Amino acid sequence: MSGPQPLSGPSGQVPVPGEDAPPGITRSRRSLPASLLVGATLVASIVVVALLSFVWTPHDPLLVQGAQRLQGPSGEFWFGTDRFGRDVFSRLMYGARTTLLVGVVAVGIAGLIGTPLGVLMGSSPRVLGEVVMRFNDLLLAFPALLLAVMFGAVYGSSTLTAMVAIGIATIPVFARVARSGTLQVLSSDYVLAARSAGRTKLAIAVRHVLPNISGLVIVQASVSFAIAVLAEAALSFLGFGTQPPTPSWGRMLQEAQELVAVRPAQAVAPGLAIALAVLGFNLLGDGLRDRLDPRLDDRRGTE
Amino acid sequence: MARFTRTILGGLVFALVLAACDAGDTVDPDDTADPADDVDEEPDDDPADDTDDVDEDEADDNGADVAGLSIGFAAEPASLDFSTDDGAAIPEALLVNVYEPLVKIDQDGEIVPVLAESYEVSDDNTVYDFFLEEGVTFSNGDPFDAEAVAFSIERVQEDWTIGLASQMDIVEDVEVVDDLHARVTLAEPSNNWLFSMTTRIGAMFSPDGVDGLDEEAIGTGPYLVDDFARGDRIDLVSNEDYWGEAPEFDDVSLRYFADPNALNNAMLADDIDLIGTVQAPEGLSQFEDDDRFEIIEGTSEGQVVLSFNHDREVFEDQRVRQAIRQAIDRESVIETSWGGYGELIGSMVPPTDPWYEDLTDVHPYDPQAAEALLEEAGAADLELDFRVPNLPYAVNAAQTVQSQLAAVGIDAEIDLLEFPAVWLDEVFTEGDYDMSVINHVEPRDIAQYGNPDFYWAYDNPEVQDLLAEADRGDEETFEENYREVARIISEDAASDWLFLAPNLMVANERVGGVPENNVGEMFDLTVLERT
């Protein structure tokens, strides 16, 4: 689970787009990085499949039909059927919905709470900021899965508790990224100028800080999305996430494991789906970073 | 480009790690009602060959050692104390093996003496004279005598907290006639009482050996608890001072696998010698083609029940209950939850009971009829809170049931509860549910339909009277009334009985004498033999 702070390099400097880097290089990239292309394609196809599942799936993903259980891949059942005779492909399509929902909600919670918190702490007096951020670090050390399992035990296992728990556990990541970005922006000349012109802290935060750190937050969102997808899969696999019969890739993997000796292919489809989704969001995050993080421009020249 | 490759690799590793989680991970704590034990000895081959008796100590690392035996189960006991903790796994491990009763059920279902050398029953079925074995001692050194019998029986009435303890309420008095003669007087005649003495409530305790029962088991049995590692295993060693015939295996390790696949894998890897209850029947094919293994398929007393909470208004109408029964294709439930093993039953009676009657046609699968019934009862668009323990068979059965109910317009929302703790508390004790699924393994548990305080709260005076009369009456009345009750509850759709759980075991070539059918509450280790 690395990747919470992809932006604070060894130097601790988080460059702000538009600054430092020679303007010529910053905007001269014409070709999209491969990672962005591949990542965006994977993510887009998952979104399309998820949307498509609202209007069409080859079969009813919830309909149990004992007579056609455990069939291999065929023209009718592209990826075969599970132990309940349900079409695996249809369930994968439906599962994409669960996956995206979890990602959106969890990252939404984390971003909408974490980012303002980070900006606020960045603009607060240094001591207060440091104290709160150390507390934040403490939370950061608390594993998201553990929190989600606790939530499941207290409030009952469901997709909702999983989403909320993953979201809460991800808040510190956003707070941290946002704060380090904020500190950078606040030390820039134009902010000093704005400040001496009598702008309020809120105005500075909204006008100068947020637009300048948005790139960082977007990249972080993409990476966190991948982590959330994986966390939901893990939770559902363990029985703490999405409840049956709602299809979820993690749950499908769990149900397939009893059949691993007989129908190994059953585990491959959801496993691959999870891998591709995680890969897609990670690549998208990487690609976006390449686009949005000018500090990397120098390196690219030498790579 | 380097980073690109790294990310790809990273993604694949994530996926592999997750996919590899299958075998040994904490999936669902399992157990409950899990088949408890068995009967029906197989013809034993040759008398034990004891040649591999060599290294007794130091072989116990992961199970299969030469002198000992390692048995894998799915159901983990919550503690060692079946007087206060529910769950079939505790008596499965300890009854007969560590704690002995006065009488037990043998392989043919007959009641035979254990600690009671013999017993006499008065003509009116109320006075039982037990003549005890001489020279029996508890593992703490105390002698076993009539005082201990009186103590044990009275303790069930006073201190036991599990529901089954109420079967002892009928005892009016226990008299210590002399050291080896205890006389039990019942308040009224009972056909069930002696039978119940073969279950956990008949276990004999030492008056000085009941402090710290959940950690320490002091009984008279052929085995002692050497080590209880929660969540992992119970190690038993043979009791050197045992009064009876020493069992064939000196060390027996009972190992618990929350994950059904891990259990099968342990067997394949020779970590264990016997699977006490196969939980992943789909995996059985791995053993079929392998000469090292023998698959044993018998029947159990475990009825997998779709229970209705009769305290809920929706279930007051018999038509609604019948509609649910008719909406469910039980063949398909067996297919999907037990890989096609298991038998259809139409009521709460296993075919091994003498009062069994084929009632599988009472409310046959007929979705159209079910829909019509629901409409007639004004219960279209029914919504049910379907609270299911997170045991593999239950989760699988629930999904099939859910889908079939959806087909007739019933919305049963599945809510998985951790088993044993949460399910036992919220469903079994508090009765907070509409519908649930569980395997009821206790013998003769049809009597719970006469207990309005049981978690399904079925309150039918006719059934209660019949059961009470059966208990008081002679054997013929008993069987007749039980048969009658089975039919009444079936026609009244008091529950739906999805199927009778199979008793599936896998043994390797080292162990013989494995009982085929699962009768009684214990996994009787004394009948196992070396091959």
Image (spheres, grey):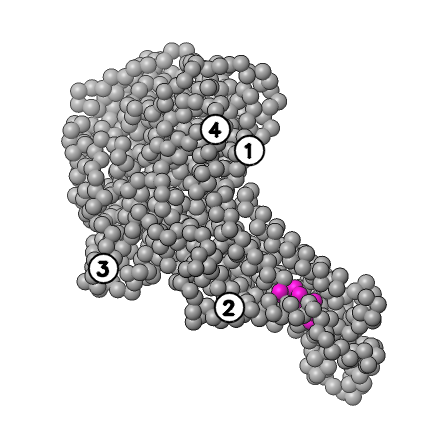
Q: Is label 3 on the same chain as label 4?
A: yes
> Is there CB contact under 8 Å for labels 1 and 2?
no
Q: Residue B79: in sight, yes or no?
A: no
Q: Is label 1 on the same chain as label 2?
A: no
From the image, state whether disc 3 or disc 4 is nearer to you.
Answer: 4
Residue stretch rendered in magenta on the structure: A280-288
The chain ID associated with circle 1 is: B
**A94, above or below B262, in the image:** below
- Labels 1 and 4: the sequence-earlier one: 1
The CA distance from mark 1 to mark 2 is 41 Å
The CA distance from mark 1 to mark 4 is 14 Å
Residue located beneath label 4 in the image: B291
Q: Position of residue B235 (x, y in %)?
A: 53, 27
Image side of residue A280 versus residue B360, left or right: right
Task: Name the residue rendered at 50%, 66% in the picture.
Answer: A97
- Labels 3 and 1: the sequence-earlier one: 1
The CA distance from mark 3 to mark 1 is 49 Å
**A110, above or below A254, in the image:** below
Residue located beneath label 2 in the image: A49
The CA distance from mark 2 to mark 3 is 35 Å
Residue located beneath label 3 in the image: B368
Residue located beneath label 1 in the image: B269
Q: Position of residue A20 (x, y in %)?
A: 83, 77
For mark 2, does the 10 Å Cα neighbourhood hold few (<14), some (14 to 19), or many (20 or more) residues? some
> Is there CB contact under 8 Å for labels 3 and 4?
no
Q: Position of residue B245 (x, y in %)?
A: 42, 13
Mark 4 element type: loop
Task: Name the residue rendered at 25%, 42% in the picture.
Answer: B347
The CA distance from mark 2 to mark 4 is 47 Å
